Amino acid sequence: MKKIIKNVEKKQENIKAKGHSYTKTEVIKIATCTDVGEAIYSCSVCGLTKTVETPKDDSNHNYANKVYDWSTSTYNSDGTISATAVDHCTRCEKEYRGEENVSADTFKSVCKKYSWSELRGLKGTPVSVNVKVTQELDGNALASISGSYGDMILIRNCSAYENSTITVYGLADGEFSYTTVLGAGKTVPAIKALLY
């Protein structure tokens, strides 16, 4: 068998390269506030892939130990308590502080009962007390823990009726001084009521 070879003239043509068009297709390692990440990028033109280091992500913190600063808490009309949440990133120690609304039950769970004498030195501490209201004072109330006049406390932001027995959840608010009807000066612990 004989081979016939024809002369073929080849014409060279310059074709402009299309270039790469990379898009992120997979994250291998998520970047955090302390560590760079890694991602795979693929070219949609030719299919080439490459692994790229991604920069640290200052928004990716590990806040895992949130506590509340209750000292400036307020009662909200929707029944929640506003409090300042405080946390520190376990990786970089950056502090997070922000106002959050927590349920009444969450607030009640951190309120501790204190004796009358222990309440005297506290301010901003979540407390709960069972009291009998003895006198209403323009949106506040004088109340007794035991029912006697020897352990009176002032409940701020409380409009409970006289002779009502209530449980108050709130913040210790230092002391309150007043003059009794007999003219004697008296200083008692105060509580800013958030729930009752």
Image: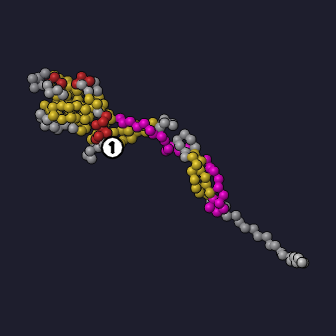
> In this image, 195 relative to 149: left or right?
right
Residue 120 visible somewhere in the drawing: no
In the rendering, at what x and y percent does residue 160 appear? 16, 37
Q: In this view, does 5 lie above or below 36?
A: below
- Residue 63, by quadrant, is top left
Residue 158 visible somewhere in the drawing: yes
Query: Who's the residue at 16% across and 28% down the image?
Result: 144
Query: Who's the residue at 48% across and 40% down the image?
Result: 62
- Residue 10, by quadrant, is bottom right
Query: Who's the residue at 55% across and 45% down the image?
Result: 31
> What residue range appears in magenta?
43-69
Query: Who's the residue at 90% across and 78% down the image?
Result: 2
> Which quarter shows the C terminus?
top left
Tag 1 secondary structure: strand
> Which quarter shows the N terminus?
bottom right
Q: Which residue is identified by label 1?
A: 101
Q: Is residue 151 above or below residue 162?
A: above
Does residue 56 belong to the magenta stretch?
yes
Q: Which of 193 and 72 is in front in this view?
A: 193
In the rendering, at what x and y percent does residue 104 appear? 28, 41
In the rendering, at what x and y percent does residue 159 appear? 17, 38
